[in-house]
Amino acid sequence: MVELRPQNLTLTGALPRDRPTDARAHRVYVATTNHCNRACPWCSTCSSPRGNSFISLPDYAASFPSEGPFEVQLEGGEPTIHPQFSELVRLARAEPRCARVVIVTNGVVLPRTRAPLRAWLLELGAPLTIKLSINHHLLAQDDQLLALAALLHDELASLGAERELVLNVRLRPDAPGQDVWVREAVAQAGLLELANVFHLQAYGFASERAGWAAPFVVGTNFTLVNPDGRTHGPDLVGRSEAMRVLP
């Protein structure tokens, strides 16, 4: 079983943004697909360009709790390339008990100019959290990723109405000298206060990495759902291993 621990500080010394609290509604973390347009070698959900599993709309709707308020976090793989991504968002917004939609993305297919990006954000509705992934692998392939982050921050702040940006910055624990530049680049972009900076952990494709810490959870008021519709409760490792064998 994954260890349950108190909330730890990020590597910047701050508490994480969008962290679990007693006041937060039950969150459903939906791995919408194991297909991704990037190939991070440590992916915790065992996703890559080879993945070909996508959650169906009936399985997705069935993952919502039967009672009480809840939040939906669309992740992957890369959720924005799900062929029915807009419908996934619409179904969540159509449920009055859904208190927030969270999108975890590498940003590859997001609009990179102001007007189209603003239109896309408006389509997502509110309350809304965009969690943009940042690491050395993504930055090496996309030298405009932090420029996108800055534009997202500006547009979300301008739209208001409970919209926010969080940067999921991940560093390799066995390459501290090599990954210093990642944190510095985020700081130079003026975005460090939005960043949850953590070391990568040993699960998913990184399950055999020597010296990497095992994953743990903070609270259990969440549910993990995979592209095949299977639910794994709060078991991060079980969910990742189930993702590994999906086509």
Image (cartoon, rainbow, N blue to C red):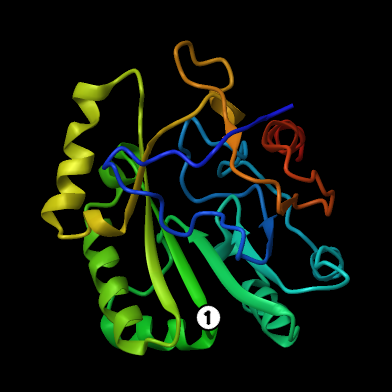
**10 Å crowding of disc 1: few (<14), some (14-19), many (20+):** some
Please state if 213 lies on the left or on the right of 171 as rendered: right
| Residue in front for this viewpoint, 7 or 52 | 7
Point out the residue furthest to the left here.
188
Q: Residue 131 at x, y = what percent?
A: 44, 60
Where 39 sits versus 168, above or below? above
From the image, tell me which residue sits under label 1: 127
Residue at point 62%, 78% (across, down)? 86
Where 177 sits versus 59, above or below? above
How many labels, in total? 1
Please say whether residue 4 is visible from this viewpoint: yes
Q: Quadrant of residue 155?
A: bottom left
What amino acid is at disc 1?
Answer: Pro
Please state if 109 lies on the left or on the right of 85 as rendered: left
Q: Quadrant of residue 95?
A: bottom right
| Residue in front for this viewpoint, 202 or 78 | 202
Q: Residue 216 at x, y = what percent?
A: 59, 32
Where 23 sits versus 242, above or below? below
Q: Residue 1 at x, y = what percent?
A: 74, 26
Q: Quadrant of the C terminus?
A: top right
Residue at point 43%, 78% (across, down)? 163
| Residue in front for this viewpoint, 166 or 230 | 166
Q: Residue 24 at x, y = what percent?
A: 61, 65
| Residue in front for this viewpoint, 137 or 51 | 137
Residue at point 70%, 49% (across, down)? 52
Point out the residue furthest to the top here.
210
Secondary structure, mark 1, is: loop
Please say whether residue 82 is visible from this viewpoint: no
Residue at point 36%, 80% (across, down)? 117
